[in-house]
């Protein structure tokens, strides 16, 4: 058997296996998808605000400390 035929056979077997596995997946409903998207979006916004606040505070502290040291 040539390498091309063997490679094609393995590729076809792989694609059949992928298709079989995809059929086993439990996909979320649109309602579940929307809910989780909203939760993740809110979480990302909250974490972004917290990181922004921490950045502003740390930069003010750092500028204040370095400002007193070098003036």
Image: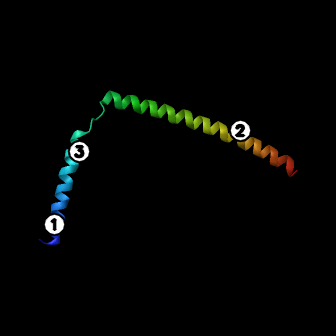
Of 26 and 36, nearer the camera is: 26
State how far apart marks 1 and 3 are (Cα). Answer: 23 Å
Proximity of marks 2 and 3: CB atoms separated by less than 8 Å: no
Apparent side of residue 37 relative to residue 56 in the rendered image (left or right): left
Of 40 and 6, nearer the camera is: 6
Looking at the rendered structure, the secondary structure element under dot 3 is helix
Seen at 76% across and 41% down, the residue is 61
Other-residue count near label 2 (Cα within 10 Å), few / some / many at <14 / 14–19 / ≥20? few
**Could you tell me residue 37's position as x and y percent?**
41, 33
Other-residue count near label 1 (Cα within 10 Å), few / some / many at <14 / 14–19 / ≥20? few
Residue placed furthest toward the left: 1
Dot 1 or dot 3, earlier in sequence: 1
State how far apart marks 1 and 2 are (Cα). Answer: 63 Å
State how far apart marks 2 and 3 are (Cα). Answer: 50 Å
Name the residue carrying label 2. 57
**Could you tell me residue 35's position as x and y percent?**
39, 28
| Quarter holding residue 1 | bottom left
Dot 1 or dot 2, earlier in sequence: 1
Name the residue carrying label 1. 6
Apparent side of residue 27 relative to residue 6 in the rendered image (left or right): right
Apparent side of residue 31 relative to residue 71 in the rendered image (left or right): left
Apparent side of residue 26 relative to residue 61 in the rendered image (left or right): left
Residue placed furthest toward the front: 1
Proximity of marks 1 and 3: CB atoms separated by less than 8 Å: no
Q: Which labelled disc corresponds to residue 21?
A: 3
Which of the two marks, 2 or 3, is nearer to us in this view? 3
**Could you tell me residue 5's position as x and y percent?**
13, 67
**Could you tell me residue 56's position as x and y percent?**
69, 40
Seen at 76% across and 45% down, the residue is 62
Seen at 17% across and 51% down, the residue is 16
Looking at the rendered structure, the secondary structure element under dot 2 is helix
């Amino acid at each position: 058997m040539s390498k091309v035929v063997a490679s094609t056979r393995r590729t076809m077997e792989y694609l059949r296996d992928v298709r079989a596995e995809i059929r086993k997946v439990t996909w979320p409903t649109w309602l579940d998808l929307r809910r989780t998207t909203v939760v993740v979006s809110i979480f990302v916004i909250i974490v972004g605000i917290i990181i922004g606040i921490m950045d502003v505070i740390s930069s003010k502290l750092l500028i204040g400390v370095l400002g007193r040291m070098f003036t």
